[in-house]
Image (spheres, helix red, strand yellow):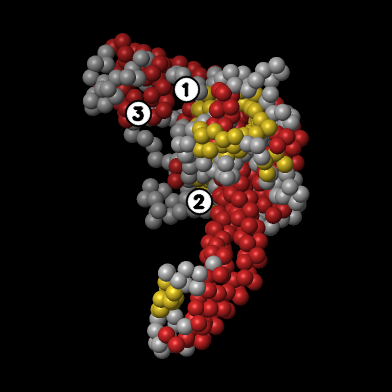
Amino acid sequence: MPFDTLTMAAAVHDCKQLAGSKLTKIHQPDRFSVLLRCYGPQGNCKLLLSAHPVDGRIQLTDRTYDNPAKPPLFCMVLRKHLDGARLTNIVQLPGERVVQMDFAAHDEIGQPTNRRLMLEVMGKHSNLILLDADTNLIIDAARRYTHMVSRYREVLPGVPYLPPPPSDKPLWSALTAEQLAEALLNSDLQQSPARLLQTNVAGLSPYLCRKICALCGLADWANSEELGEYELTRLHEQLQKLAAIIENGGFQPVLLGQKHAWQDFYALPPEDAQPHQQFATMSEALDAFYQRRQDRQAFTGEHSHLHKLLTREQQRLTKKIKLEEADYADAVEADKYKNAGDLLMAYLHMIKPGQTEIALPDFYEPEKEVKIHLKPELSAVDNAKRYFHRYNKAKKTERQIKQQLDANRSELEYVESLLVALAEAENTADLLATAQEMQDAGYLKRQQNQPKAKSAARKEPEKFRTSDGFTVLLGRNNRQNDRLTGKIADKEDLWFHTQKIPGSHVILRREPNRDFSDTALAEAAALAARHSQAREADKVPVDYTAVKNVKKPNGAKPGMVIYFEQQTLYVTPKDLQPIETANETANENGTD
C-alpha cells in the first residue's frame, strides 16, 4: 500500500523527538534519499528522507546505507546550508503527505538564518526541496523542473516555493457529522461506502477507507444507497477516533503478511484475520520491512547470477556430452569399419567408379549382405583405406572418449546438484555456501575480501517429523549433504536419494526399539523427491539404504557418493512438517 497520510503521521510522530537536535552529518545515498545524522538529548539518530517515486517516506533508521564516493550536487547544497544547523520543528501539513522541517542555521559569514526542508511524498512527483524560510525562495531541490513539466509550479533555485496543489475535496478531520453526510450523500451512491468515502473526502487512502468501513460494518456493502443516519454517524465517530489516534500518537504499527515474508506495512493493525506482526514504532516497522526487501532483492539478484552461470555450464556440458556420445557410438562400432574395409578389398573387382553404395556378402554370414556406403569421388582401394582409417581411429580413441565421457557426465551431475542446492537456498548464507562451492569448482571467480560461508556449511540440517513420529533430516546443499551423511547420521539410520536425479540427502532416524514403518519410509522418500530436480514430477524413484552402505569415493566432489544394497520407492514429492531448530529461531529474529 502507499505511504499514506496516516502512515506518515505515525512516522512523523517518531521523528518529533529530534526537535532541538543538531545536524552533524548529511549524506545522500542515492538520487532520491537524504540521510541526516542528528545529535540531541536522545543521543545520535539518523533521519531518512526519501523522495523515491515508489518508496518515498520519512523515518528514523538504524540501517547502514552506502554513500557514493563523490556526493551529489544536492547533498553539497544541503551541507552548505544545513551543516551544524539545529532542527527546530517538524510537522506534517494537514491531510497531505508533505513534511515541513525548520532549521536554525548560519550563513557563510556566520549570521543566523532560517532554512526549511520540504519532503513531498507524491508518487512520481515526490521531491525534497530546500527553502530560505524567511523569503520562501527555493535554494535547490532533489528534482528540478520547469513549467514544461508542471503547469502548476516550477521547482528551480530562486523561484518562490508553491506547495502541491490542494485537493478540491473537504479534509476529513475538519468535517462535522452534518458536513460529512452532505459530502457523501450528494454523490453517486451506486458505489461502495469505502469508494464513496475515498472519492468525496480528502486525506484518506483506499486502504484506510476500507478499514474505516470495516469498523462500521459496511465492508460488504456493494453500494451506498441504504446509508442512513446511523451508518453516517458511525463513520463520523470512526473518523473522530482516527483524529484522536493521530493527535495522541496512539499508533499500532504493523507489518502485514507472514513473519519475514511481509507484504506491506501500516500504522494500524488489520481488522480481519490477516497475519501481521506489531512493532513499537513506525520507524522500526519500516526499517524491518525495507531491510527485508533489500535482502530479498540482493538475494534474488545473486541467485539469478549464480543460476545463469550454472545453467550456462549445464548447457556446455550437455552439448559436449552429446558430441562425445556420437564419437563413442562410432568408436564402439569399430569392428564394422574393419569388416567393411576387408569386404571392399576382397571384392575390388565388383566396385564400379562413381558408385555410392554396394551390398556384399558377409564373411561370417554369407547368406546376409552388408551394405557399405562409398564416396563416389574415391577409388575402391581408397574407400577401403577410409574404412580402415576409421577403424584405427575408433580403436585408439574409444578408451579416451569413454574416460572423458564419464568425467563430463559426472561433472554434469555435479552441476545439476549445485542447481538443486541453489533452488533450495532460502537466505544469503545458503547462497554464499553455494557460491563458495562454485568458486572451489572453478565456475565462479573468487572475490577479494569475500565473507566465508562457514555458518551455512555448519548449519544444522533441517529437521522434519513424519506423521507417525520419526525424525527426518535434510541437507540443503552439497557440503551440508556431506556433513549430514558422513558425520551426523548413524550407521543404522536410513539414507534416501532420488534415483539418478540430483537432489538433497535425506536421513530417516532410527528410533530405539522401533522398526521403520512403511509410512515413515514413504514420507521420507517423498521429502527426498520434493527436494530434488524432480520436485514437480508425479512419480519419482527414490533409493534408500542404510547409511553404512553409503560411501564417498576419494577425491569425489562435495555431495557425490556411491551406495549399494538399496531399495526403491516410487513416490509423489511432498514436504513434511518441519521441527523448529535454533537456526530457524535465529532467522525469525532477523539474523538471516
> Could you tell me which secondary element the residue under label 3 belongs to?
helix
> Could you tell me which secondary element the residue under label 2 belongs to?
loop
Q: Local crowd at mark 1 within 10 Å, few (<14), some, or many (≥20)?
A: few
- Give the image location of residue 496, x and y in percent: 62, 35
| Residue at image mark 2 | 143
Quarter of the image for the C terminus: give it.
top right
- Give the image location of residue 169, x and y in percent: 34, 31
Q: Is residue 250 above or below residue 36?
A: above
Q: Residue at x 48, y 39 (%)?
A: 536
Judge by depth and name the residue closer to the eye, 264 or 190.
264
- Between circles 2 and 3, the one closer to the viewer is 3
What amino acid does circle 1 point to?
Gln
| Residue at image mark 3 | 198
Is residue 426 at all visible to an observer of this figure? no
Q: Reading the chain from its start, which is encountered first: label 2 or label 3?
A: 2
163 vs 199, left or right, is right
